[in-house]
Structures are given as C-alpha cells and as structure tokens.
Amino acid sequence: MTVANQQAPVGGQKQENQFRLLFERRFGPFFLAQLGGAFNDNVYKNALVILVAYNAATYSALEPAVLANVAAGLFILPFLLFSASAGQIADKIEKSILIRFIKAAEIVIMLVAAAGLILQNLALLLAALFLLGTQSAFFGPVKYALLPQALGPHELVGGNGLVETGTFVAILAGTLVAGVLVSTSDGVMWVTAVILGVSVMGFAASLLIPRLPAPAPDLRLNWNIFTETLTNLRFATRDSTVFHCILGVSWFWFYGALFLSQFPAYSRESLGGSEQVVTLLLALFSVGVAAGSLLCERLSGHKVEIGLVPFGSIGLSVFAIDLYFATPTSVAFQGIGPMEFLAREGSWRVVLDLFLIGTFGGFYIVPLYAQIQTRSEPAHRSRIIAANNILNALFMVAAAAVAVLMLSRGASVPQLLLLTGLFNIAVAAYIYSLVPEFLLRFLDWLLVRTVYRLRIKGVEHFPERGPALLVCNHQSLADALVVQAACRRPIRFLMYYTIFNIPVLNFIFRSMKAIPVAPHKLAPEVLKNAYDETAQALSQDQLVCIFPEGAITIDGKIGEFRAGVSNILERTPVPVIPMALSGLRGLFSYNPKLKWFSRLFAPIYLNVGKPIQPQDVTPDGLRDTVIALQQARSDKPR
C-alpha cells in the first residue's frame, strides 16, 4: 500500500497532535532527511564565510566581503538554473527513489567540500557550495510536493508547520555549530567530520521513506532550462490563487532575506553588539518563525486556513515598524555581549519585536505553502513548486539589490527595516485586492474564534474537487461566514438581493462572488439571473450554497424548504451536501427574545451530512435530513 492510500478521514473524532507525524514512517524519515540537509547547508556555508573572512589571504587575493557575496551568489544561482528541470523530474520519478539519489549526491558533494577544507582550495570550496545549491534546488520541489501525497488534508498544515520549523531551527543550529567548530584549534577537521556524518545519516533516513507514486510518469523531459522555466511559470499562473500565493511566499523570502542580511550591521551600528549579539538576533527570528509555524495547526483548526495570512502580514508590518522606534538613537558602547545587551534599558522591546516578526512570519508562510500544495494540479505540482523556487530566488536577489541601493543612498539599517515594514503593507494590500478570498477568510477566522467557538462534524463530506450544492438551515446573518469558515474551498452563496445591495457591505458580498436572489413576484429578472449564474458556477465545478427556508428563523426552528433547490437541480444535477447550523440564535439573529451578548463567545455547531444524489432529493426529505443533522450535532471541537 502506498502512503497516499493511508490517509484516513477524520470525521468528528478528536484530532491528534502534529508531533505524532515525527514518529510515523510516512513523515518521520523524510523530516530527518530534509532537516539534515538544511543543517548541513548552513554549517558549510557559514564555516566557509568565517574561514574566508578571517583567513582571506590563505584562500584568495580578493577582499573577504567580495568573497562572501560571491559565495552567496553561487548558492542561489542553481535555483534559477535548475529549478525547472528539478520540477519535471519530481513529477516524473517516484519520490522516495529521487530523494535517495539526492541524499546520496549530498555525500559526494560533502566529500568535495571536505577536500577543499583540508587542502584549503578555494576552487573546490566554491564548487562544493554551487553543488550544494544545485542539490537544494532539486530537493525543493520534491519536499513540498511530497507532503500532500504523504499526509491527509487535515494533517497538511501541521506537516508544513513542522517542515518550516525544522528549516529555521536547522538554519540557526547550523550557524551556531559552524561558529563554534571553526573557532576551535582543529576547526576544519571538526567541520569536515560533521558535514560528512550528517550527510550519511540523511541518506540512511531516506532509505526508510515509503514509496510515493510519480504523478506524471510518462512526462517527457525538456532539458532547455529557458523554455521549461517559462512552462513552469505558465503552470503556476493557471490558477490565479495559486500564483498569488507564490507571490506571497516570494515576498516573505524578500522580507526575510532583507532582514537577516542586516543583522550584522544592525547589531554593530545600532545596538553596539558583538558577533554573539548577531547570533542572538538570528535565534530570536528563527525561533519565532518556528513557534508561529507550529501554532498554525492549532489556530487553523487542522485545515488549510488562509485567513491566517492577513493576520501574519499585519504582524510583519506592525512589529517591523515598532522595531524602528525601539532601536536606540545612539549607542555608548561597542562590542557588548548578549547578557550586557539584554541588561540595557529598552533591549527587551527589540527582543520581543524580532521574536514576534518571526512568529507572524510563521502564521503568514505556512498557510501559503499549504494552499499552493492543495490548489495545484497533482500532475503539475512539483513544477509549480519549482516555479515558486525560481521566483523566491529572484525576490531574494532583489532584496539584496534594494538593500545595496538604499544603504548606498545614505539610509541607515533601522530605516531600511522600517521601509521593509511599510513595503509589506503595500504588497499585502495589492495581493489582497487581487485575491479578496484572503481577507474574507480572515474575517471568517476572526468570527469563529472570537465572537463564536465553532464546532464542526462531518467536514470530510465537503468534496475536494467538483461541483456540489450545499444546503443549510438559516439562523443568522453570519451563517454564510460560518459555513465558509468550515470549508477549505471557496463557496458561492445565494443571498437575498436587498441584503446584497446594502451599501459598503455590497463590496464584501461582491468579493465573495455571492449571487443575489429574489422572489419571482418581486424581481423576476433577479431570480432568472440567479438561476443562470448558479448553473454556470456549478458547470465550472464550483460549490454553491443555498438557504432554502428563504428567511432567517426567529424561533430557532427549521422552516419549510422552498422550491429553489429543486429548480437548481433540474437544470444542473449535482450532488447535494446537507448541513445543519445551531447555536446562532443570539448575535446577528432576528430573535428578539435573546440579548446579543448572551451568545457572545458561545459554541456554535455545524454538522455536515453525506452527499445526496440529485435524483434522490425532495424538499421535504432534505428538510428532514437537515433536522436530523441538527439534532445529532457534535460536542467535540474540530
């Protein structure tokens, strides 16, 4: 049995902790393999930079700063050159075999690096760095395309959170270990032993990864990197939401690269800190990203919740701007250590800002990666992720160019960080204007985690793909937001036309692509257009939701179902998903007997039933099903 077939629906049972994945064969060996690779990359890169910086004459006549930038460029260049080919190969070849080949190549590359370190040969050292970048470029598409195959939909956010946590912990640990090892008398030998040992352990872990079938085994490889790069980018742009998620991910790497590259100058010039304070700043950012990534699963309710993305972007701007104002205007000391820095007045505000920037970065990045994975066509997923890697590399190069430009024009490092936070506001506003789904899901997320406490049963009955007509009882003005919060896919709601046309709110309803509907006797043309638009949406494999009572309940009981469902199915026969809401009779309802605050923070329930085939649907039978679902509501939160 393949891993992909081991995904069990979760229904209403209690969700297990994401850390259990580390002990399961379908995830644990892969996690160790990718963790070891990220750790090795950073041990070697940082050891090389330190050795060149402090022993430049031994290796080359070039300035240390020039060599450091050459090294950074050599590591990023393969992502631009080889990501397109890597995406093709990851779609064509079974993933466990491909990962073993990549991890075996890592051992060979580390042997080249070891030879360069022992012989103090700069050509070998730079060649190994370029090859490491190449290996990472080939591993990236496999890494992120593997997760949707190995994990169930309810595990995807937790799995991505663990991968992002591992990546940033590896960056931090690799940086620290490189600094410690190089400072010893036998530093070169220790670095050699570590990178070789970790590469061998990574290969050993890869041997335990179970088979993951190739989604496109008959794919013909195109070795022209230029035409294939364009092809990958075309795949990425087929779904506008996927492409805008890729732009969002790339922006995060622009933001992160710009921040991380300024830490040495920020520590020295703005905080008066030593090299150890630089490490502290990196640790704060990395641990923050790890914490935010792990918290995503709990905050998202075990599903891909892109409503966290605007939440994350808010924090990325707020705390970057606050960092500017928290930075001392002048420093009286130079070269102070971490403990002296923490003892200074105002330092804890800097510490908190950097940690929270990382945390909100985790909230931002994990849902975006999960959304790319779930919304991408499986046969093209690796190539779409390869396109993401290409754009990530371009954005990181652009971040370096912006930093050089601004600093050369007299900007200080704190001003550059402030500008990054302000840029983030503009970029976020642009992306959310193109994809209103992000902001709408943010509103959903706030509603069901602040005003209410949403409990869901039967979420697995929402179809992953294809059309369906969702049918639900009508309890309040917030029903549509609650239903959308429970479903990963966008839903088109039929909405009474007078409510749809309310000023200001109309912008939100149009962004939701709601469909205005009216009684035939009041507005026959509106009703006709509603049926036409519903038929078109269902023919395009979208989800449409109708509240067949036609009005909000005032007594909590489910009213008579009108003929709208039958009319829709007669024209476009699709499966019907019955749903029952309960607990929404206070805030946003029309019940005059309940004070609004009596329902604030109260639990609300959504029970999703099994699909019903269109030929089996009748208004009375559907109403009886919804009543039964309401009576069988679950008391266990999802």
Image (cartoon, rainbow, N blue to C red):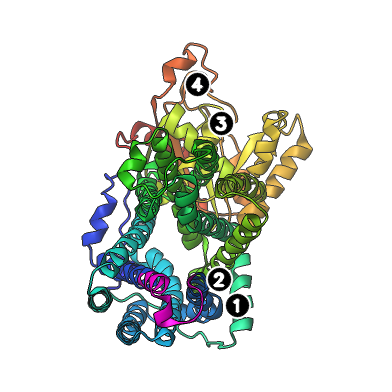
What element does badge 1 sit on?
helix
The answer to whether one can see residue 93 in this image is: yes
**Where is mark 2, residue-wise?**
390
Amino acid, disc 2:
Ile
Rendered position, 124 above or below 465 = below
Q: Are marks 2 and 3 in contact (CB under 8 Å)?
A: no
Camera-side mark, 4 or 3 = 4
Where does the magenta region start and end? 47-64
Q: Magenta stretch: residue 129 in it?
A: no
Q: Are marks 1 and 4 in contact (CB under 8 Å)?
A: no
Q: Are marks 3 and 1 in contact (CB under 8 Å)?
A: no
Q: Which mark is residue 549?
A: 3
Q: Residue 295: x, y in percent?
A: 36, 45
Q: Which mark is residue 587?
A: 4
Q: Residue 420: x, y in percent?
A: 58, 49
Q: How far apart are labels 2 and 3 at the CA level? A: 50 Å
Amino acid, disc 1:
Thr
Q: How far apart are labels 3 and 1 at the CA level? A: 52 Å
